[in-house]
Image (cartoon, rainbow, N blue to C red):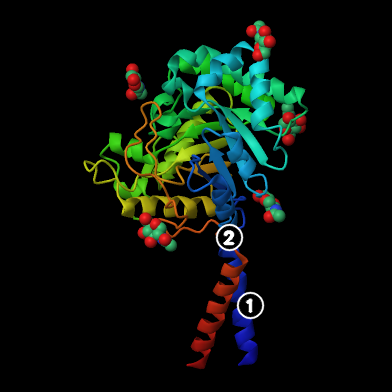
Amino acid sequence: MCVSLSTSLLSLLLLLSLLLPTTASLPPTIGVTYTPSARPSPERVASALQSLKVAAVRLPDPDPEAVRAFSYSNISLLLTVPNSLVPSFAANRSAAALWLYTHVVPFYPRARISAISVGSDPLVAAPDLSPLLLPAIRNLHRSLSDLGIRKIAVSTTFSFISVMTTAFPPSAAEFQSPASEIIIRPFLDFLAETNSSFMIHLYPYNVYKLDHEIPIGFALFQEHPFNFRDDRVTGVRYRNLFDVMVDAVISAMAVAGHENIPVVVAETGWPSSGDGTDPDASKIYADMYIKGLMGHLRSGIGTPLRKEGVAETYIYELFDGDEKQGNETRRGNWGIMYPNMTKKFDIDFSAAPVGISGGGLVAMALGLVLAVGVLLWQ
Ligand SMILES: *[C@@H]1O[C@H](CO)[C@@H](O)[C@H](O)[C@H]1NC(C)=O
Ligand SMILES: *[C@@H]1O[C@H](CO)[C@@H](O)[C@H](O)[C@H]1NC(C)=O
Ligand SMILES: *[C@@H]1O[C@H](CO)[C@@H](O)[C@H](O)[C@H]1NC(C)=O
Ligand SMILES: *[C@@H]1O[C@H](CO)[C@@H](O)[C@H](O)[C@H]1NC(C)=O
Ligand SMILES: *[C@@H]1O[C@H](CO)[C@@H](O)[C@H](O)[C@H]1NC(C)=O
């Protein structure tokens, strides 16, 4: 009996090891967008996020005090230069250097600044600045080099619905003209030259609101036999709208000649309440979206077109606010925490990646031992 138990166990464990995904990539960094305000103080927020094991924070309009507050945390930072500074950065490298002297130099590298976005969705928020965007980006990059800082990447952000021709099928997606030729192609060349990432505001909520044929479950990561869409050109099956949108970006980059640039989702989220006219802006849906997103990212499975998936994802946003950027829908409350630092949703930033969880494996093996034990007992 003892012998047969151990042989069955062994073969079962062998089977188990064959069934377990061994190719899942390292899951992407999951962060959050935080707009500092007087209360709670940036120090309090930084230490709370540190103890919640939040890996990364995007500061959309950083004042130096907020950067300082994160200096003693191990949280990586994505800083944003306000759109209003794009013209001066483009005109004069010393304006970029001045900004670095107040926002970066005093705190770096203690503050783990990983990247700086020059502007936030400037094509939509300030279209007249578009010819100045790349010169501003290059000047900031040169200023960093002048300071001997080579590990901070420089980029900018675009919003999905304003730069992409379509979401579906992803293989048919391109960047819209004329921005594609005038701005995005040379910008992608810059990203490739400098090892930086393409940053996008990616809201399945907005695409879902524009196309009512999309089932809500497809936007909310709900596994369901009918929640899929096939890309007939590539033959790829999609099970959630987030992957559709990421692969649309990857296809558009490939058309523009750059298929390998990492993708950072600089903003994504779901409103938990709206102006009262939108039943889809609900706490239940926001909860499903955030949990579904985190579970999907942690699986390490990536997207059909890119097995390592996106490099980083920043959830929009930490606290409810009423910002409006360009044409993006921003009515309602997008926050995932209350100002008293309690969580609005039961999400766990510290959870181990699903694909490589040792605890999960042990639990599974234990379950099997128990099951086999019961079987043999009878
Ligand atoms: C800091 O974060 C990095 C990556 O996010 C991790 O590898 C490292 O172990 C962390 N260090 C501490 C002291 O938590
Ligand atoms: C660039 O800015 C610096 C300092 O702000 C100023 O002294 C200089 O004249 C400016 N140069 C140009 C070409 O505007
Ligand atoms: C955004 O709004 C501007 C006017 O504020 C309008 O001209 C433009 O067409 C809008 N863009 C989109 C993508 O809706
Ligand atoms: C970009 O990354 C590659 C590989 O990691 C490295 O060889 C190259 O020097 C990097 N280039 C720059 C400009 O940092
Ligand atoms: C934090 O604020 C929320 C919303 O105002 C409230 O529901 C919750 O009870 C508060 N938690 C604590 C610990 O004060």
In the rendered view, tell whether residue 14 sits above or below residue 66.
below
Q: Circle 2 sits on which residue?
A: 352
Q: Which mark is residue 361?
A: none
Q: Of helix, strand and loop, which one carries label 1?
A: helix
Quarter of the figure with residue 345 = bottom left
Q: Residues within 10 Å of mark 2 (few under 14, many from 20)?
A: some
Q: Amino acid at mark 1?
A: Leu
Q: Nearer the viewer, residue 101 or 369?
A: 101
In the rendered view, tell whether residue 212 sits above or below residue 371.
above
In the rendered view, tell whether residue 171 sits above or below residue 91.
below
Residue at 54% from the left image edge and 22% from the top image edge:
256
In the rendered structure, which disc, 2 or 1, sits on the residue that comes first in sequence? Answer: 1
Q: Amino acid at mark 2?
A: Ala
Residue at 63% from the left image edge and 22% from the top image edge:
190
- Pointer 2 with pointer 1, Cβ within 8 A: no
> What x and y, as percent, mark residue 161?
39, 29
Q: Of helix, strand and loop, which one carries label 2?
A: loop
The CB of the residue at mark 2 lies under 8 Å from ligand 1: no
| Front: mark 2 or 1 | 2
Q: Circle 1 sits on which residue?
A: 10
The answer to whether any part of residue 227 appears in the image is no
Quadrant for ligand 2? top right
